[in-house]
Amino acid sequence: MSELIPRTDGAAVLVGVDFGLPHFDGELEELGLLAQTAGLQPVARLVCKRRAPDAALFVGSGKADEIKELALMHRASEVIFDQTLSPAQQRNLERQLDVAVYDRTFLILEIFAQRARSHEGKLQVELARLQYLSTRLVRRWSHLERQTGGAGVRGGPGEKQIELDRRMIGESIKRTRERLVKVQRQRGTQRRQRERRDTFNISLVGYTNAGKSSLFNALVKARAYAADQLFATLDTTTRQLYLGDARRQVSISDTVGFIRDLPHGLVDAFKSTLQEAVDADLLLHVVDASNPHHPEQMAEVQAVLNDIGAGSVPQLLVFNKLDALESAQQPLQLRDEIDVDGVQVCRIFLSARTGEGLPALRAELATRSNSAGTDTPETMSLGDGAELHEAAD
């Protein structure tokens, strides 16, 4: 019956399973944004509760039938789960639902593949996608029957197609890693050159769509791509910023945004890009102050920083989008301190869009950079936005 009803390409049913975890997004708002960013159109949402995932279908057979009816009703061509599915669960669901089934990990990988612009960024995404695909060969390939041997083989069974496919992907992973190592060496050389210049290094980190690129542009008068969407920026861009109060130049880098349940393969593949945060003298942790879930987002960012070895780098909290706060939510002062995991951390409220609070941020950066030492006179000759390094296309 499902084959008689035409499907709408890009129409997707969103599914979330509440296992009682504190960060569960009951409205599937973020999954919907991810789907739209990937070029899909959410047409229906379904949320259910379970104590534990079903081993075969993740949601159980009854709920799977409900999802199938929902997909038929809305002519959806795909179903997207907010959690990570095992290869077997994904395969079983596709057979049961008779539509393509994806999970949150695949969706994020697709967005990264669409957004990567630099050679290094594309290699990093390709590596993560290949690693993800290597565990899911059994569901995407329809020609997995055992082949017969070629000429000279007397009727013996040949190698399974899935084994050939797995070997091909393994070789692609090896080649991609080798190419990535070469690019990473170049980035390492550029990083060491900055260290020899005794430059104070600042990296912007934060949850995706917190406004990092907008703040970066406002500080250095650059034109890095910025948009009100998830993962608008994937490639690291580094510029020089002149701080008049300190009478010195500092190096500031805009990095990829973080997100809840960021696929481990992406964290691993992007470690060279995220190395800018590890090697920084100061992290500007940009927070979307207007997002009601910003405490959970801050925790997710901190978890990734700990994972890549940047958890101990000094931080300055920047609560962005001040202009989007209601009058009752406006802070009493633009600079204060808050407790983060038992440590008092300086916080500055600002709006990268209107410029409110930027002078306070510049003053704080000048104080921090002066306390870290002095720069060489040569670095003071360049203006804001002078390029140190930008990932090449």
Image (cartoon, rainbow, N blue to C red):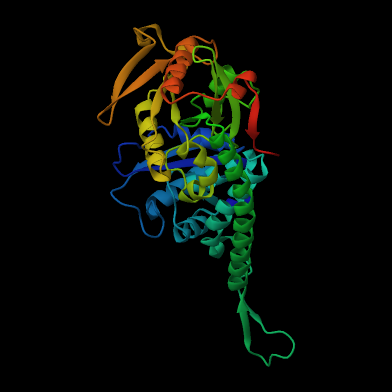
Residue found farthest to the left: 342
Residue 335 appears anywhere in the view: yes
For residue 357, above or below residue 141 = above
Residue at 46% in and 49% down: 264
Q: Depth check: give the residue in front, 122 or 155.
A: 122
Q: Depth check: give the residue in front, 46 or 178.
A: 178
For residue 134, above or below residue 362 = below
The percent coordinates of residue 4 (x first, y second) are 63, 50
Residue 141 appears anywhere in the view: no
Q: Quadrant of residue 40?
A: top right
Residue found farthest to the right: 151
Q: Depth check: give the residue in front, 175 or 265.
A: 175
Residue at 44% in and 51% down: 65
Q: Is residue 79 left or right of 311 when viewed as pictured?
A: right
The percent coordinates of residue 313 (x first, y second) are 39, 34
The percent coordinates of residue 89 (x first, y second) are 44, 58
